[in-house]
Amino acid sequence: MRKGRVNAVTNTPGANHKERGSKCLDSKMGNKQNKSNKSKDNVGDRKARGDRSNETSQQLDEEAEHFIQLTLIREYPSGSHEQTSMDVPSNMLVTDFLSDLQMRFSIPAERILIYRHNGNVPLPNRKTLSHQGITDGDILRIRDGSLN
């Protein structure tokens, strides 16, 4: 009479089959879950990393920040001046630009007056530097409005 398979290591009938079967089921289920989660994670990871492989280079170039170099001349009431240069994004908000100038020259932002080098009228306070017509190489004069 035949008893069935005997595991040579544990000497128990059918042990190999049960262990193998449970491992197979677990590993198959695990693989299915891992695959489905992995594909979702990859999409999320690509978005989080900013993977833009599907976009054209023209779209990416349009969104890239274009930096412009400005020469700033800080004018003092005594007639003296201080000259520095500054690289800024052309799409920088005026409020951010004023904050940078405030830190650089220690003038409260609401009192800063910005003039073109060859003009006597302060620049209007529009959204971005490019909206004001400020381009690469421009020279700007900076004054404290309360001292004029």
Image: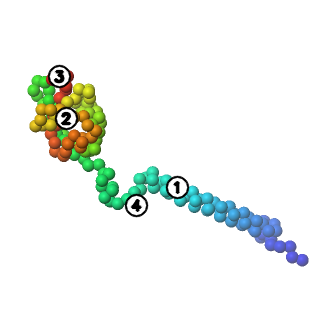
Question: Is disc 1 surrounded by few (<14), some (14 to 19) or many (20+) residues within 10 Å?
Answer: few
Q: What residue is at 37 percent from the left and 59 percent from the top?
A: 55
Disc number placed over residue 41 in the picture, else none: 1
Q: Which residue is mark 3?
A: 147
Disc tally is 4
120 versus 89 height, above or below: above
Looking at the rendered structure, the secondary structure element under dot 2 is loop
Q: Position of residue 30 (x, y in %)?
A: 63, 60
Amino acid marked by disc 2: Leu
Amino acid marked by disc 3: Leu
| Quarter of the image where one finds residue 99 | top left
Q: Which residue is mark 4?
A: 54
Q: Position of residue 2 (x, y in %)?
A: 86, 76
The answer to whether residue 18 shows anywhere in this view is yes
74 versus 86 height, above or below: above
Q: CA distance from mark 3 to mark 2?
A: 18 Å
Q: Which residue is mark 2?
A: 123
The quarter of the picture where the N terminus appears is: bottom right
Q: What residue is at 43 percent from the left and 52 percent from the top?
A: 49
Q: What residue is at 27 percent from the left and 40 percent from the top?
A: 128
Q: Earlier in the sequence, mark 3 or mark 2?
A: 2
Q: Nearer the viewer, residue 102 or 131?
A: 131
